[in-house]
Every structure is written in structure tokens, then in C-alpha cells.
Amino acid sequence: MLFNSLDFAIFLPIVFLLYWFVANKGLKLQNLLIVIASYIFYGWWDWRFLSLILFSTIVDYSVGLGLKNQKNPFKRKLLLWTSIIVNIGLLGFFKYYNFFLENFVAVFKFFGHSINPQGLNIILPVGISFYTFQTLSYSIDVYKRKLEPTKDFIAFMAFVSFFPQLVAGPIERATHLLPQFYKKRIFEYDKAVDGLRQMLWGFFKKMVIADNAAQHANEIFNNFGQYSGSTLVLGALFFTFQIYGDFSGYSDIAIGTSRLFGFDLMQNFNFPYFSRDIAEFWRRWHISLSTWFRDYLYIPLGGSRGGTWKKIRNTFIIFIVSGFWHGANWTFIFWGALNAIYFLPLLLLKKNRVHTNTVAEAKFLPTTKEFFQMFITFSLTVLAWVFFRAESLRQAVNYISTIFSQSLFAIPHYRGMRHSKISLILILVFIIIEWIGRKENYAIENFGKNWKRPFRWTFYYMLIVIIYIFMGPQQEFIYFQF
């Protein structure tokens, strides 16, 4: 079920009313309603995949109980590895089976041998990368004794399948989200209004910015051989705002929806395109995944402790694994490696924690130095996104080669150029509002809070009208494929 669909527009009010006016008599009843609603929400795509969520839930719930009662270190590790192997095994089969098979065949072909193994027509379950990591965080934290295992199976089911963030995050830690299912929730008007406001901004990002940018990005990337370098730069810029508007828009809708039901989810994006270096960008982009890899992979590998070689090794591991998490294609692996190359100089020179505050924190405009830092970081990010968007490494290399040719100085032109001017104006307005609200959890959290109520509500209604008038053709959320 898509957030930007009529189905969800009907589904959400029904669940909301049942949750606060029917199931409000008991915590278990509310949690059970969340489980039922979440399974309906997910099963809307393909009910057969509900068995995978249920299986992962049962495995990790059982592992947690086993860890609670087990003192033997070897048996505790065995239980932990049971969870890891089951969850990563399911993820690996559905997401990477054909990728590894194709590359296995390619290696044999390279050495002059021809084999024809049977591939499988595997449908990737929506959101499997997200809920797999969420359940793994529970098993790992219980193993490390950071979290007391739960005996409440319904609460655990609700934690694993919580519908607002089930299919595209944020990837919540069990230590943060699970305890919220133990506490009685009371409806808070201000919290609900804040949730609706964040949802509104998320819908604007997705339906106006991302969906319109997608039209232009798709046209240019799909026919890049016909266009000049300057046009390809425009295509890369459109994709840059498409993926940000799409994914951060989803996160805003998910976080806002959760607040309607009395839950707090972690911030997943913190205005990443205003970063002054790549290290800051990765502290602000897809925060739930970046911190997951940091805590459960990078630090256990030794982090930035040890010699130079270990720092380089760990940096490449975490970025390449992060790239591979996004999809079974060498383009994602290269995208991860490229970001590691961007990041390494900062780490080795111990400058990766220089920019931990908000840019131009006490001022409205950045300094000249900050402006150029943001420009360089943004440019490097746009270049990396070309590999992320391309169908193959060959296409990405050819795309970038055309950018850095003499045609870079030609006037951009492509089919749909006239409509792109409206999209660029909308993106500019979007950037201005994001800049004004860069210190908040989301751009319009306190936008116009000192205005009188009629003016403030006029702004919200204007956003709704803009969404209605300028929304692009409906596009599936990009991260559903991951």
C-alpha cells in the first residue's frame, strides 16, 4: 500500500479511529490492532510474503527468550548466529541469489568454461532489507545485554511489523521502539498536529519534488546517448533531488504517521545537502542505516582504532556493504567504494568530526568558505548518484564521460525541457524552505510559528493546493526496491 494512494487515504483514518476510540481500553488491544493493521498494510502488495515477516518474528522472539535463559557463552553465540544466519540467509536468497549466480557464471566464462546453471524468477519482498535489520538489532542487543528480551509476543510482532516504517524505514533499534509498545499511549493533540504537519511536508517532497524530478531524470538517463554533457548534468541534478525528496519524504510521512498513534521514531534525514564535507553528509543521510552499520559492523571491526591499514579496511568494508545493501548490482558496490574514497582523507587527517553543528548556525546566510564547502560536497554527491542511478557501470562511465566533454558547455535541451522550468522553480522554493528550517527536525516544524493562526493555516492550505496542482505522475517509492 503506497502512502500516496487512495487506499492509504482510506486505511489510515479507519485505523486511527479504531485505535483511539475502540482499542483504547487496553494496551494489548492497541498493540494487536497495530499488528493486524500492519499485516493488512504489507499484505496489500502480496499476502504470501507475510509468512516471511512472521517467520523472522518467531525466530528472533525465540532467540531472545533463549538468550535470556542461557548462561553458557558458546550456546549464547550459537543462538545469536542462528538469528544472523536465518535473517541474512533470507535476505541473501531473495535479494542476491541471481546476482551471485550471474557473477559465478561470468568467472567461469572468463577462464574459458561455459556453464548454464538454472536461475530463479525471484520476486523481491518489499522492505525485506529494512525489517531484517530491525529484527537483527533486537537479537544483537539482547545478546550484548543492552536490552531485556520481551515475553510479550504481540508487542514484539508490532515492533517488527509497525506499518508506518515497515517497508522503507527508518530502521528502528529495538532499544528505542520496542519499549514504546509496553507503555500506555494517550492521545496528545499537539503531537498529532505535529505529525500531520510532518506528513504534509513529506507528501510535498514526494509528490511535487520527487515525482516531477523523476520524469526528467528518467528521460535523460534512459536516453543519455542523445544528449549533451550539460543536459546530463541536469539529469543528474534531477535524480539528486528525486532520491532525496522520495526517500526523506517517505521518512517524514512514516514519522508523522507514527506520531498520530503516540510513537516517536528517529530522525532519518537531517538536511544532508547542506553538508560541508562527506563525513557530515553521511551523518545526515539515511541516519538509521548509517548508524546501524556503525554500531553493528564498523565498531565491532575495530572502527577507527588501530593502524592506518585497519582504518582504510574498515572504511571500505562499511561503505561497500552499505552499497551492496542497496541492491544486487555492481553500480551500488562502486557507489559505496566511491564514497569510501571521498571519506578516507577526512578520516586519515582526523577531520571527519569537524562539522558537527548546523551550517551557518547563528546566521541566515553561510560564509563564502561554507558556501564553497557545501558546493564541493554537493557536487561530489551528485557525481556519485550517477553510479547509483545507472543500469550498469558501463552506462555510468559513458554518462560521466559525456559530462566531461566539450558538450558540457552547450545549452541543455531534451524532450520535456519546457516543463522542467516549472520543476526547477519548485525545487528552488523547496531548497529555500529547507534552508530556513535547517535547524529543525523537518523543514516546516516551526515554520511561521510566530504568525497568527490564519496566516499559518493559509500556508498549510497553500501547500495542499500546490501538491494538488503540481504533483507529478505517481511513482513508486525508490527504496521499495531495496
Image: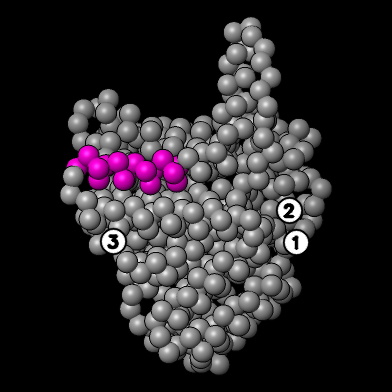
| Cβ atoms under marks 3 and 2 closer than 8 Å | no
Q: Tell which circle, 3 or 1, labels the residue nearer the N-terminal end.
A: 3
Q: Residue shown at 55%/38% (left/top)? A: 93
Amino acid type of the residue tagged 1 in the rendering? Pro
Percent coordinates x, y for residue 178 in the rendering: 35, 67
Q: Earlier in the sequence, mark 3 or mark 2?
A: 3
User: What element does badge 3 sit on?
Assistant: loop
- Residue 54: % across, % down: 50, 58
Please state the extent of the stretch shown in magenta in the rendering: 73-88
Q: Which residue is mark 2?
A: 215
Task: Residue lying at the far top in this picture: please name it.
Answer: 112
Q: CA distance from mark 3 to mark 1?
A: 45 Å
Q: Is residue 78 in the magenta section?
A: yes
What is the distance, in whole Å, between disc 3 and disc 2 at their CAs? 47 Å
- Residue 452 highlighted magenta (yes or no): no
Crowding at dot 2, Cα within 10 Å, few <14 / some 14-19 / many 20+, comes out as: many
For the residue pair 133 and 157, the one nearer the viewer reads as: 157
In the image, which disc is placed on residue 473? 1
